[in-house]
């Protein structure tokens, strides 16, 4: 999610001038624009995919999304599966299971509690990984702020959908596991081959699911188009954009921008789907975002 960065030394300075922020060059600006586009693409894809829920249901949309992700990642990673050892295969299998469960729980949560709240709860996954990796007092404060945001979002009320909230938290747990497993896969398998193999295996597991959904609920061209758009906008575009961005933007800045994804999800859900949030829900989203921003800024200081 985000990593602590050491403060750079300044050897050779004879006089200590007042520090000035470096001007972003063209490469950095392109990276920032790419991050904006990636975030909007991800949340817009989820919103468009939810338009297919009445026909395909969340399961059908996730199945199509897994297929699209597999096609893209297999084309990029080109894994040589026959060369994988058991030590390489078992984290790939777990990653495939977590990948599918994460998307399925998230999209089902979106169907029940809306895009903004579902994405905010899912965002607790990478946030918890980042906070657990540190022992600083400021991170304890961040955890308290994030917990307060979750309590605000999940507070008991007549209209509360606790199953939907639970699915959002399940997606958060899967995202945290996804991060840890990706690290293991990345250490054991070079390049993007491991992630590609996991995406392909996940799509294979969803193949009978997709067939069953198509038989029980014959898809319409519009529904299939929305599901494919979700796969492209929420899987293919962010994956390629992140690879492009991380080569041009420091990891802390990348993590800092990821903090606005719950806000983007709330705005896209409101504009595209008409899912309005009350002030308490926006407060909860703001608390989760603030916890991550504070943690990253403290790590950079």
Image (cartoon, rainbow, N blue to C red):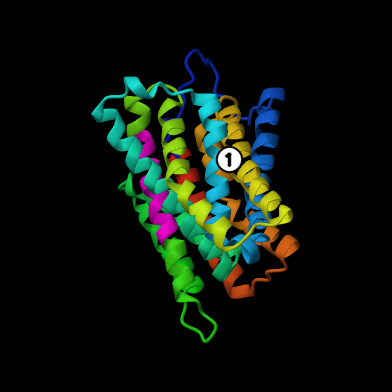
Q: Which residue lies at the image location 43% right of the left edge and 56% below the top edge? A: 172
* Helix, strand or loop for disc 1: helix
Q: Which residue lies at the image location 49% right of the left edge and 20% below the top edge? A: 10
Residue identified by numbered label 1: 68
For residue 133, which quarter of the picture? top left
Q: Which residue lies at the image location 39% right of the left edge and 58% below the top edge? A: 143
- At label 1, counting other C-alpha atoms closer than 10 Å, the crowd grade (few under 14, some 14-19, many 20 or more) is many
Q: Which residue lies at the image location 46% right of the left edge and 59% below the top edge? A: 105
- On the question of residue 223 being in view, the answer is yes
Q: Position of residue 205 (x, y in %)?
A: 42, 46
**Residue at the extreme left:** 86
Q: Is residue 177 magenta?
A: yes
The range drawn in magenta is 170-183
Left or right, residue 200 beside residue 49:
left
Q: Position of residue 11 (x, y in %)?
A: 47, 15
For residue 35, which quarter of the picture? top right
């Amino acid at each position: 999610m985000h990593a602590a960065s050491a403060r750079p030394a300044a050897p050779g300075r004879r006089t200590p001038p007042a520090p000035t922020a470096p001007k972003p060059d063209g490469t950095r600006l392109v990276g920032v624009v790419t991050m904006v586009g990636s975030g909007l693409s991800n949340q817009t894809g989820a919103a468009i995919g939810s338009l297919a829920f009445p026909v395909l249901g969340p399961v059908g949309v996730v199945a199509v999304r897994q297929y699209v992700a597999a096609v893209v990642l297999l084309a990029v990673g080109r894994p040589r599966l026959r060369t994988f050892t058991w030590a390489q295969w078992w984290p790939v299998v777990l990653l495939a299971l977590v990948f599918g469960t994460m998307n399925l729980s998230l999209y089902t949560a979106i169907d029940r509690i809306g895009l903004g709240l579902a994405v905010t709860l899912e965002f607790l996954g990478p946030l918890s990984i980042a906070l657990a990796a540190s022992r600083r007092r400021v991170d304890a404060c961040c955890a308290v702020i994030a917990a307060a945001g979750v309590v605000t979002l999940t507070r008991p009320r007549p209209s509360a959908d606790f199953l939907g909230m639970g699915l959002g938290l399940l997606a958060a747990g899967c995202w945290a596991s996804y991060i840890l497993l990706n690290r293991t896969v990345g250490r054991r398998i070079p390049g993007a081959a491991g992630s590609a193999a996991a995406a392909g295996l996940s799509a294979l597991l969803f193949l009978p699911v997709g067939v069953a959904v198509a038989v029980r609920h014959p898809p319409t061209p519009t529904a299939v188009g929305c599901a494919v758009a979700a796969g492209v906008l929420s899987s293919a575009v962010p994956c390629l954009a992140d690879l492009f961005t991380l080569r041009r933007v420091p990891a802390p800045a990348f993590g800092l921008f990821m903090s606005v994804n719950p806000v983007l999800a709330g705005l896209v859900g409101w504009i595209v789907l008409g899912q309005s949030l009350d002030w308490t829900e926006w407060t909860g989203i703001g608390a989760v975002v603030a916890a991550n921003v504070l943690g990253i800024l403290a790590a950079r200081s």
